[in-house]
Amino acid sequence: MFSLHEKEDTIVALATPQGVGAIAVIRLSGKDAIKICNRIFKGKDLESQESHTIHFGTIRDGDRIIDEVLVSLFIAPKSFTKENAVEISTHGSSYIVNQVIKLLIRNGARPAKPGEFTQRAFLNGQFDLAQAEAVADLIHADSETSHQAALNQMRGGFSGEIAKLRGELIHFASMIELELDFTEEDVEFASRDDLRILVEKLLRVVEQLISSFDLGNVIKNGVPTVIAGKPNAGKSTLLNALLNEEKAIVSDIAGTTRDFIEDEINIGGVIFRFIDTAGLRETTDVIESIGVSRTQEKMKTASLILYLFDLGDTDMVEINRDINKLENLGVPFLKVANKLDKANDQFVNELKANHPDTIFISAGQKEHLDDLKSQILALVNLDKFKTGNTIVTNIRHYDSLVKTRESLLDVLHGLDAEVTNDFLAMDIRRSLHYLGEITGEITTDDLLANIFSKFCIGK
């Protein structure tokens, strides 16, 4: 959180990634942003220009020309931060960028802190806290689904749900608070039956939002997917085939993969974090046994397991035993039969009869991989997301919703026990507090500092 004095400063930062590029954008925000830029800009008088206009000219340090630039003006309150703002588009040389930023600092600006532009936008009422957090999610979105989720939240989809819940509860809270002023009159402004109906309705909505977090976490962070099976089942070959590159070492020698190799694959707009693990087997090799132990730990924490086995080197007894172990593990898994090009037809037919949901592939020949990808995607339930339902993707929001649920349940317990209004009012106020934490109606300096410190500088 920044001090009141710091909020009055004009801040400057590079808004585009560090490094050499065709152009770089330097951003300023604050009441003196246009004035400071005007001091080093040779062209039109920026202080007499209209908002949302772009001007060509040069940036100069005295008589020395640093660069030819385009300057975009945003006059308060018509800017991202609702302050005067300037964006200077320079050539992408790191030398030019550093020279321009140092010149702006000499003329009255100061370097922005991480997330300070977005924090000013929040503090100036441009959007609420949940929408501000969505800005960071949008920047880091690396798939269609994560982009769509962040965009929906930034546009106020999630905030609208929370505001509606909070608004309905505030009405009853005010009525109960009013009753406290008339305790001697024995007047009822808020019907207990109506309050119960409302709280039960709110609980249903809160439960839906809480349950959506599993999907939201998948959308935002990807699906941890472990490829598990015996040594030489073709796990590394499958990973390479899915990635379309030689990421993992492939060898006929059993136990080549001693640790795990991880990479991301985008399937149908969802990021899957595939993990190629050491083969599952009994071994006396100390290093390999550590890898096997880590594989078992990875399997417990995975969201999906691809159980891969070699059709030419596995019998039905072994497959049934492995499947039984996976079922006891409780993690969703797919049965993937590899090396179909070398398989015995009789065994394939037996496997189809006993396990009709088996997916048959040849990782080495890259055959039927699209079928495998379709089945992988089918295990991620995106139906809620595709129908436009609000999805919770932020752990902070999830935590506040869980606390809201607990407080609302306390209200119901209070109604059952026929507690007095002052106790009911306390539990309702707690529910409102936790809902308000999500959107920023209720904040602390530590909370804001923690959230915005995770943003990149320049945003």
Image (cartoon, rainbow, N blue to C red):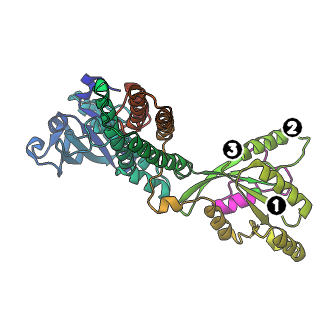
Residue 316 drawn at (x, y percent): 90, 64
Q: 385 and 424: which one is in front?
A: 424
Q: In this rendering, would 428 be left or right of 100?
A: right
Looking at the picture, how far across and down is residue 110, in whole percent? 28, 29
Labelled disc at residue 286 = 2
At x 12% / y 43%, what residue is drawn?
A: 46
Q: What is the CA distance from the residue labelled 1 to the residue labelled 3? A: 21 Å
Judge from the rendering whether residue 65 lies leftward or rightward of residue 351; answer left or right.
left
Quadrant in the rendering for residue 309: bottom right
Using a 10 Å C-alpha cutoff, classify the residue at mark 2 as few (fewer than 14 neighbours), some (14 to 19) or many (20 or more).
few
The residue under label 3 is: 301
**Mark 1 highlights which residue?**
309
Can you tell which of label 1 and label 3 is closer to the viewer?
A: 3
Q: Amino acid at mark 1?
A: Phe
Closer to the chain start, of discs 1 and 3, is 3
Kind of element beneath mark 2: helix
Q: Quadrant of residue 107?
A: top left
Q: Which badge, 3 or 2, is on the more N-terminal residue? A: 2
